[in-house]
Amino acid sequence: MDQSTRGSRAPEVLVELDRSLREPLSLQLERALRDGVRSGSLRAGTPLPSTRALATELGISRGLVVAAYAQLGAEGYLRRRRNTPPVVARGVGAAAAARTLTADPEWPHNLRPDLPDYGAFPRGEWLKSYRAALRGAPNAELAYGDVRGSAQLRDALAAYLGRVRGVVGEPEHTFICSGFAQAVSLLGCVLLGTGRTRIAVEDPSHAVIRQIVARSGLETIPIPVDAEGIDVDALVAASPDAVLVTPAHQFPTGVVLAPERRARLLAWAEESNALVIEDDFDSEYRYDRPPVGSLQGLMPERVVYCGTTSKTLAPTLRLGWIVAPGELVWPLVEQVLYTVISPPRLEQLAFADFLLRGELDRHLRRMRLRYRRRRDTLVQELGRQLPTLRVRGHAAGLYVEAVLPDGMDEARVLAEARARGIGLAGMAEHRAEAVREPALLLGYAVAPEPSLRRAVSVLAEAVRAAT
Ligand SMILES: Cc1ncc(COP(=O)(O)O)c(C=O)c1O
């Protein structure tokens, strides 16, 4: 018998249906519940009302509620239970993605896809640079200074990015900010201020980054990603004012934007006077061939280039940069000035010294070898211990996408894995629209090879428990 229909024990959820819309009521119901899970207002473990109770409350047929629950169960948002109403699944939605960013990174088995090997942070060399910066900085550097950041760092970055990424950027067009996260937030406000209100985002894309974009007030339009990157035909049809892309290594699918699509994306931007925000995510790590250059180098007046030290050195540095087209320079100056006045400078001076002494190049050469070995180990162990998972994506970046067998419940696998001390992520939490294939995102940067092998055997246990 349906437990939650018993009188006052029936839980309530806030769902508003609009009968004046053309969208069918069942889809509206699905959307409301999905949005609730994604935004975190329906928390993991929350029981939903019985189909009968919810149908009565909303004045719709019970069949519509049954269909909506079934769909959301199939998408991994709800955990269905026999003879009792479903509960909100663990490990889905923006709230889950946010938890993976904010939770303690010290998992016993750390397979988080968004971390570099922060234990390998070159403390000694950084200290040398920090000392040199502090000792050498004239007093004037301790004042507010240029809102764009230290001129020394902007010069050093322009040379570095030109050399390794083909970025065409004057130091005058370069802004130092607090990671890519702040870059997105600043750009969102600036786009709105210049009358651009609609921005396309890749679907899937990092759920937290998408939230940052949305909170700047822009309307976000999800555009599907396939094996060749963002679907440029769908983008052109949506006709947004700007698009945010990860062309070097798409997060989270790991695909690289195909050459023909790169060309069409730029042609579209030029023809429609739209802006492309290039998140040069993971471009430092390509293990089977050199990475393609930045999009920005091909069309600096239409592409806003963004980078970060979060995947090369350590996320805690919170050092990122924007290389902006001329038309955005003054709006960005104002946006920085009227939000934070100017970014903290001592880390910037240290980073300038670090770059100029060639330490970032040296660190990356070391780390690429290490990550490549770890990637090979992870892929091999997955093949050996979990042959039903299909590893997808290029030999690049800091994680692999492992597609789960059809019908396997991604949220359940995540919950079983996390309960066993594995830090990892799932594809569903990064999707804006309906979940297709269930998949795991498994990082190999943090754990050395023996720990990776152990982590995969624990993951194999979790997958068995979830089957
Ligand atoms: C797609 C993507 N771009 C960039 C970043 C880096 O952000 P930040 O520089 O704010 O640490 C992340 C972090 O996980 C990310 O997922």
Image: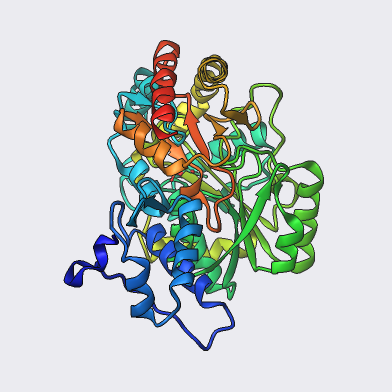
Could you say where residue 361 lies in the image, as x and y percent from the top left? 55, 23
What is the number of callouts on the image?
Answer: 0
Picture residue at 40% right of the left edge, 20% below the top:
455
**Is residue 229 found left or right of 407 in the rendered image?**
right
**Residue 237 coordinates in the image, percent (x, y):** 74, 67
Q: Which residue lies furthest to the bottom in this view?
A: 20
Q: Quadrant location of residue 24?
A: bottom right
Nearer to the camera, 33 or 71? 71
Task: Please indicate whether residue 193 sits to the left or right of residue 303 in the image.
Answer: left
Q: Position of residue 319 (x, y in %)?
A: 42, 41
Please state, as top left, top right, bottom left or bottom right, where the C terminus lies in the image.
Answer: top left
Q: In this view, does 66 lie above or below 84?
A: below
Residue at the farthest front position: 1
> From what the image shows, is residue 164 above or below residue 208?
above
Determine the residue located farthest toward the left in the rendered image: 8
Which of these two is toward me, 121 or 218? 218
Location of residue 325 (image quadrant): bottom right
Q: Give the position of the N terminus as an image quadrant.
A: bottom left
Task: Name the residue located 47 percent from the left edge and 44 percent from the top edge.
Answer: 320
On the question of residue 403 being in view, the answer is: yes
Nearer-the-camera pick, 183 or 447:
447
Where residue 353 appears, x then y in whole percent?
A: 45, 29
